[in-house]
Amino acid sequence: MRKRDLLTPIGITLGFIMIMLAIISNSGTEGVASFADIPAIFIVIGGLIASMLITFKMEQIKLTGTILKEAFHKNDMQLAGLINLFIRLSERARREGILALENELENVEEPFIKKGILLAVDGIEPEVITDILNAEITAMEDRHYKGRLLIEKAAEYAPAWGMIGTLIGLVLMLNTLSDPSTLGPSMAVALLTTLYGTVLANLVFTPMAAKLEAKTEEEVFTKQIIIEGIIGVQSGQNPRILEEKLSAFLPKDYKGKNEAEDAAGYVGESVNEA
């Protein structure tokens, strides 16, 4: 079940608040205005957008909003409920035959589970089912990587454009040394562009890319459990043996929740689809 991930906006907001508090504690509220510089913003944001347009195709650029949105959502994965679902499927398959599982799929929303069970019902060999589902996982990882690459490149380009802005500011400052009134604005561009680029990279883009990578790993882990469950159901494993096998995937502190989870409440959804 998809839920909003409040930690991402909280973390970004907290980071900016800490920066603002540091400025205010040193120079008061009047000092905040000195950290807002329009030319520096133009250099960093404009340069970053230009670099992204050069690096990626328009089809990829259009997905930026969707990819960023994924960092603000999470999957409430009920692993114990997922295991209980396969135990129930195993019990019915042993009692009524593998073909009876088609009726069970009406209560399952996760396409990956449906696909695997249908392959099992069709009598496909376990090795072939595993290959097909692993190929789907590989394709998913590739899609997620390509989406995440936009954020990683933004994290790489932002500090670079900050340094470019610093060089521009220094050149402007050196060209106008004879006029003391221009030193302040030129120095502001030189320093603030580096600040903007570094903050964007380390507070926004890099953490988001890391979160998206972690979500991909989490989804791959869940789908590996699903594959093991499907193969166990198809092979007619004893439900208790299947339970022990799948429970090995759970963290120690999670295993105690296994009995409390209701399989009917499990709703699988893809994570971080871009």
Image: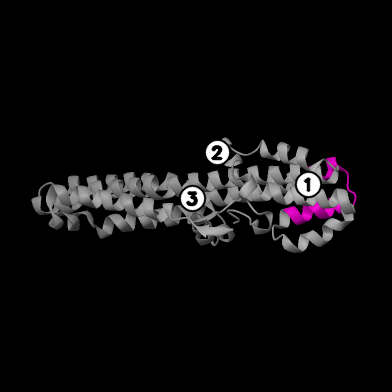
Estimate how packed mark 1 is, as few (under 14), some (14 to 19) or many (20 or more) residues with alpha carbons within 10 Å. many
Q: In the rendered image of this protein, does residue 104 appear above or below residue 145?
A: below
Amino acid at circle 2: Asp
Query: Does the segment drawn in magenta span residue 123?
Result: yes
Query: Mark 1 — residue?
Result: 230
Residue at 24%, 57% in the rendered image: 37
Query: Does the segment drawn in magenta span residue 53?
Result: no
- Secondary structure, mark 3, is helix
Query: Mark 2 — residue?
Result: 253
Question: Viewer-proximal residue, 81 or 2?
Answer: 81
Residue at 59%, 41% in the rendered image: 256
The mark that comes first in sequence, 3 or 2, is 3
Instruction: Choose mark 2 or mark 1, whichever is in front.
Output: 2
Q: In the rendered image of this protein, does residue 50 appear above or below residue 222?
A: below
Amino acid at circle 1: Ile
Amino acid at circle 3: Ile
Instruction: Choose mark 3 or mark 1, whichever is in front.
Output: 1
Residue 7 location (% of width, % of height)? 42, 52
The mark that comes first in sequence, 2 or 1, is 1
Q: Which secondary structure is most common in the magenta stretch?
A: helix
